[in-house]
Amino acid sequence: MRTDPVVLVVEDEPALRRFLRTSLTTHGYRVVEAGSLREGLAMFTSHNPEVVLLDLGLPDGDGMALVQRVREFSRTPILVVSARGREDQKVDALDAGADDYLTKPFGVPELLARMRAARRHARPSEQPVVEVGALTVDLERRLVTVGGEEVHLTPTEYRLLALLARHVGKVLTHRQILEEVWGPGHARHTHYVRVYMAELRKKLEPDPAMPRWLCSEPGVGYRLVDLET
Ligand code: CA
């Protein structure tokens, strides 16, 4: 019996689909392909893939629709494969529940790394302690340390950090952060996030001007990740 993880590629450009199929098959994935939104949804249901690579510009609609539909019943990681210059699309897709995005053109090592990360973080690890480099967030004890030293955070700073820690490795959009930390109705107050992120960096980062863990995704949002590994 085959146990290679199944990846669903939803992409209408034959050349890119071929490239993805070859690269992913070489690296131990079983690839199922769809060239349209409708086909993508059908394949998702019939193959129950472990991860989805999704193009947004599809002949019969926006890939966003697939994100929304799938998120009604599944937490399977979805990586958006997006053309450069469509930052608004990326943000919408992440807000709708996509896990990450890749900007075309991208290399195979980056693709594989992001797929590994998405699969790792999709597992509902009830891991109460999240470690990112020397930074440790103990979600059960609400304890934050850097290099073993406890760092005191305000309640809002902690809520922000804990949110990022619960989704470690995943990009969270400004809107997601505002809704989770400050509640609905704050969607336009992106400066809140900027201000609190600056405070968190001052308290946690070895060099707040060159963040290593609390990383910006320009125009999109933030993610907690260790850039050193
Ligand atoms: Ca396309």
Image (cartoon, helix red, strand yellow):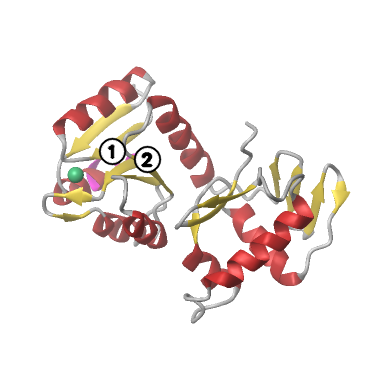
Residue 156, relative to residue 68: is it above or below?
below
The residue type indicated by label 1 comes to: Leu
In the image, is residue 48 part of the stretch drawn in magenta? yes
How far apart are labels 1 and 2 at the CA level? Answer: 6 Å
The numbered disc on residue 51 is 2
Residue 206 visible in the current orientation: yes
Magenta-drawn segment: 45-51
Task: Name, please, the residue furthest toward the bottom.
Answer: 185
Q: From the viewer's perspective, is 199 left or right of 182? A: right
**Residue 132 picture quarter:** top right
Badge 2: few (under 14), some or many (20 or more) residues near its Cα, within 10 Å? Answer: many
Please tell me which residue is depicted at 80% across the width and 57% down the height of the picture. Answer: 143
Q: From the viewer's perspective, is 64 left or right of 184? A: left
- Asked whether 107 or 121 is in front, the reply is 107
At numbered mark 2, what does the secondary structure look like: helix, strand or loop? Answer: strand
Please tell me which residue is depicted at 44% across the width and 31% down the height of the picture. Answer: 110
Q: Is mark 2 within 8 Å of ligand 1?
A: no
The residue type indicated by label 2 comes to: Val
Please tell me which residue is depicted at 71% across the width and 55% down the height of the picture. Answer: 201
Residue 202 picture location, percent across and down: 75, 56
- Asked whether 96 or 109 is in front, the reply is 109
Task: Name, please, the residue furthest toward the top.
Answer: 26
Can you identify the residue that label 1 sits on? 8
Task: Name, please, the residue furthest toward the front.
Answer: 209
Residue 156 picture location, percent across and down: 70, 70
Residue 206, relative to residue 63: is it above or below?
above
At numbered mark 1, what does the secondary structure look like: helix, strand or loop? Answer: strand
Task: Name, please, the residue furthest toward the left.
Answer: 60
Q: Of callouts 1 and 2, which one flags the residue occurring earlier in the amino acid sequence?
A: 1
Q: Quadrant of the N terminus?
A: top left
Residue 126 picture location, percent across and down: 63, 50
**Residue 198 picture quarter:** bottom right
